[in-house]
Image (cartoon, helix red, strand yellow):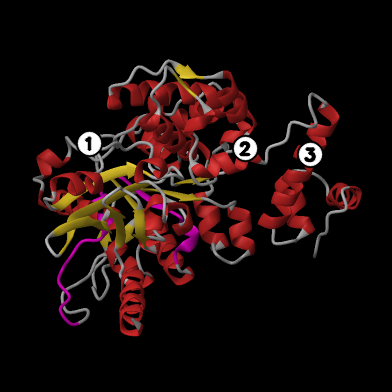
Amino acid sequence: MHGMNMTKEVLGAILKSIDEGIHVVDIEGITIFYNGVAAKHDGLEIDEVIGKPLLEIFPSLNEKTSTLLKVTKTMKPIYNQTQSYVNMHGKRIETINTTLPIIVDGKMIGAVEIAKDYSRLKLLSERLLDLQREIKRPAEKKQKSNSVKFTFENLLTKNPNFQKIKDEAIKLASSDSPILVYGESGTGKELFVQGIHHASRRAKGPFIAQNCAAIPETLLESVLFGTAKGSYTGAVDRPGLFELADGGTLFLDELHTMPIELQAKLLRVLEEGSVRRIGGANTIPVNTRVIAAMNIHPRLAMEKEKLRSDLFYRLNVLAFGLLPLRERPEDIMYLTRHFIDFYNKVLNKAVKGADREVTNLFASYEWPGNVRELKHTVEYMMNICEEEYLTKDEFPAMLKQQFASYSFEKGYSLRENVQQLEMELIKKAMTDAAGNIKQAARLLGIPRQTLQYKLQKFSLTGAE
């Protein structure tokens, strides 16, 4: 007996340490093992799943669509099946699954599913293919095609301030000056940038996007500027993104994650209009428009020494600050209706809209993940909705928790609600400014003395 317990403990430890999602159900469809990787994929906690019927935890599945339940019925394994789904937190997950029957002494006792997340692998391989296609494409064809999917028409809004930003961007798109776009994650920066490219004289040229945080610092320089043969062991002549984007637009996202030394080289390329490959002697002229984006305020990035001030002033000739969704209240239900229409077509459903309770809760929520979070939320709800209208029963787990603690006790009292909002904005500004009152006051657009008074009034603490 002691040996058997030992075996179970060792096996459990091994299964927990494997970098793949493992989910085991018994013959009744009750989960008997579920590791941390599987929980991360699904956006759940292990305790929420163990000992529960599969269909109770995953309401979007049924006996026909669940691979685990299918295998417990057919006793036939399913190998390397790709699966794409939105988890309980509205995150898109893409996995390759293998599902096997568990047979002991000739008798079926359950099934195990092994799921490998290939979202990142897929993203990298697609980017590599895009770049290879860009390199191999004949020059005449290169002019006819690019990777832009969105125009300004795709950037939907009914908010007059956001519309003004769009109108200004359309006017300035024809310029060749570099552009800086900043806004919180999920506000649509890449969509906005693609809109600028499409409205520019470079619309027929290539559009290449590179997230500066998605690639190791040591590789970023060679990816941007290219390499010369012999510059290091095994190095070959390879163009960088500046050369590949020649005649078009190079979009550098999360610019503040680029090493400071590399920012100096980027500034040189912007000023000289030419690039030198790593280890190369020659300068290569490039006609590439650079658009950079950041998800923090550029002045804050400079204060934290994550952005060179000379690079900022070179990019800040044309700058756009994208509004968070909470500052575009009229867009919340406007975009919700648009996403419902979109997923009705994709999922072949006929959902008419959201019920009054969902509408009120959506309007009250701050949407920290902005339009991206709203889209993922609607996608998740549409996947599991079986009725004519979306209800709070379809909310992802995180939103359910958020709204469970939501209080309407302030009712319609304008003074109390405005005071609550004021406190929240001050807290957020103080957090973003790392406790610096002067910087927080600048972010809030109020005098420092006013902020100090409000910090005392609301008994909030601030540090210099």
Q: Type of residue at label 3? A: Gln
Q: Identify which amino acid the numbered label 2 is placed on.
A: Phe
- How far from the left and from the top, in percent, is residue 134? 17, 49
Quarter location, residue 62? top left
Residue bearing the label numbered 1: 64
* Distance of label 2 from label 1 (alpha carbons): 32 Å
Looking at the image, do the residues carrying marks 2 and 3 touch, with CB atoms under 8 Å apart?
no
Q: Nearer the viewer, mark 3 or mark 1?
A: 1
Of helix, strand and loop, which one carries label 1?
A: loop
User: In which quadrant is the C terminus drawn?
Assistant: bottom right
**Quadrant location of the N terminus in the rendered image:** bottom left
Task: Decide which of tag 2 and tag 1 comes sooner along the chain.
Answer: 1
Q: Which residue is mark 3?
A: 420
Of labels 2 and 3, the one closer to you: 2
* Side of 63 where 368 appears, left or right: right
The residue under label 2 is: 403
- Name the residue: 60% across, 61% down: 302
On screen, 332 above or below 217? above
Residue closest to the eye, 409 or 3: 3
Give the Cα distance between marks 3 and 1. 48 Å
Answer left or right for 404 relative to 167: right
Percent from the top left, x then y, of residue 164?
56, 26
Q: Secondary structure at mark 2?
A: helix
Give the residue at x 62% y 65%.
304
* Figure check: 318 above or below 39: above
Tell me which numbered mark, 2 or 3, is placed earlier along the sequence. 2
* Residue lying at 56% horizontally and 34% vertically, measured from the top left: 325
Q: Residues within 10 Å of mark 3 (few under 14, many from 20)?
A: few
Q: Is residue 251 magenta?
A: yes
Q: Is residue 321 visible?
A: no
Percent across and percent down for residue 27 are 26, 51
Range drawn in magenta? 233-258
